[in-house]
Image (cartoon, helix red, strand yellow):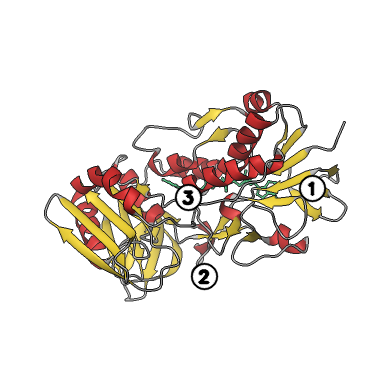
Amino acid sequence: MSDPVVIVGAGLAAYNCAREFRKLDSSTPLTIVTRDGGGFYSKPMLSNALAGNKTPQSLVMKPVEKMAEELNATILVRREVVSVDAAARSLQLDDGTTLAWRDLVLALGADPIRLSLAGSAAGDVLSVNDLDDYARFAERLDGVRRVVILGAGLIGCEFANDLLARGIEPVVIDPAGWPLSRLVPQQAGQWLQERLAAAGVAFRLGRSAMAVLAGDDGYTVELDDGEVLQAGLVLSAVGLCPRVALAEAAGLAVAHGIVVDRGLQASAPHVYALGDCAEVAGLSLPFVMPIMQQARTLAAGLAGNATTLGYPAMPVVVKTPACPTVVSPALGVAEAIWQVEADEAALLARHVDAEGRLVGLVLMGEATKQRQQYAPQLVPWLA
Ligand SMILES: Cc1cc2nc3c(=O)[nH]c(=O)nc-3n(C[C@H](O)[C@H](O)[C@H](O)COP(=O)(O)OP(=O)(O)OC[C@H]3O[C@@H](n4cnc5c(N)ncnc54)[C@H](O)[C@@H]3O)c2cc1C
């Protein structure tokens, strides 16, 4: 039997790549190695699970045994790949096993960025980036009345909105002046902030957390302006950093993410990467839709029909029911201006470049209904 295609990881990138590959090739041996439990879940659901009354168990849409059966794959769980030898086409697991591969796919995801905070309880700050994290977070929510969230980006705002469903007061801290500051103009950020605040989310914007200390009833969080907040839990949502260490140690080219070409091939033959760990044409896009495009392109290549990855603009739905929001960031566009129209019910922000092209978009409230109208007008992210 020939050596298998080995996929490292069992997130959306790995499983979608495996599914697409199996549509084209049902017989090549396929092995998936993951350091988590291997159950299939949709990571975006982690930040609206409370409103949906989901438990960590019910978030698993398919157990690992079912995935193995459907994909006709061997899935090794709770095993970590510790090194890769690209020239020898082999990898080593943490239990000392060596696996040979025909092709290797790295779908390693990204690590949450940790702020360097002072204080005795800085190490207790949680982040939620996978199912195991979510289980720890959910377990600790019982009896908690207030959660301090570090970061007013997409994930921070989503968790804030979701905590309201449990009657918990979220306080969101961010050094930026408005929420989603990297994605939307100030007027749109303030529009979102007003609606989240009306629903019960407190904000401390233009502020940074400096220290987290253990308190009588949980934690105290000290801010740079001297304010001290009490909280039952502190959640960090300040961004992700692609997991590149394994690739770097294997001598593969790494920039922000693992550098791959538009066929998803890394800098060594027969090694590929996709998902949150990968960087294509200078773009690291930690969203589901780009991953689906990557999975189809990579699967075709693995099955012997290489194609070139392209991205249309793929607007992202921000899961803040208190203020329905859709954003499509302008990628790689140096000069563009925002044109914003807003009333009480709707906000439309068009990001327009010097040639009058629509390079970015924000829709809020009633304007989200215009998504189908505007999305086709957006300049592709990668033509
Ligand atoms: C809370 C939250 C909400 C989100 N909401 C949205 C949304 O609404 N819309 C959207 O488009 N995107 C959203 N995203 C982003 C999206 O979910 C991610 O881009 C996507 O799930 C990443 O998938 P991945 O497979 O690349 O990474 P992951 O799902 O992180 O998978 C990485 C896998 O690699 C394994 N692994 C890593 N290192 C090793 C090793 N050395 N050995 C073995 N296994 C290893 C891990 O165990 C894991 O199985 C959200 C993200 C978060 C955190």
- Camera-nearest residue between 121 and 342: 342
Label 3 residue SS: loop
Q: Is mark 3 within 8 Å of ligand 1?
A: yes
Q: Is mark 1 within 8 Å of ligand 1?
A: yes
Q: Is mark 2 within 8 Å of ligand 1?
A: no
- Camera-nearest residue between 230 and 49: 49
Number of the label disc, if any, that sits on residue 303: none
Q: Are marks 1 and 2 in contact (CB under 8 Å)?
A: no
Residue 195: x %, y % from top left: 20, 52
Q: Amino acid at mark 2?
A: Ser
Question: Which residue was labeled with disc 1?
Answer: 94
- 158 left or right, relative to 46: left
Number of the label disc, if any, that sits on residue 116: 2
Label 2 residue SS: loop
Residue 325: x %, y % from top left: 29, 49
Q: Earlier in the sequence, mark 2 or mark 3?
A: 2
Q: Residue furthest left?
A: 344
**Residue at left offset 56%, top offset 41%:** 12
Res. 83 image quadrant: bottom right
Question: Which residue was labeled with disc 3?
Answer: 287
Question: Can residue 168 be seen here?
Answer: no
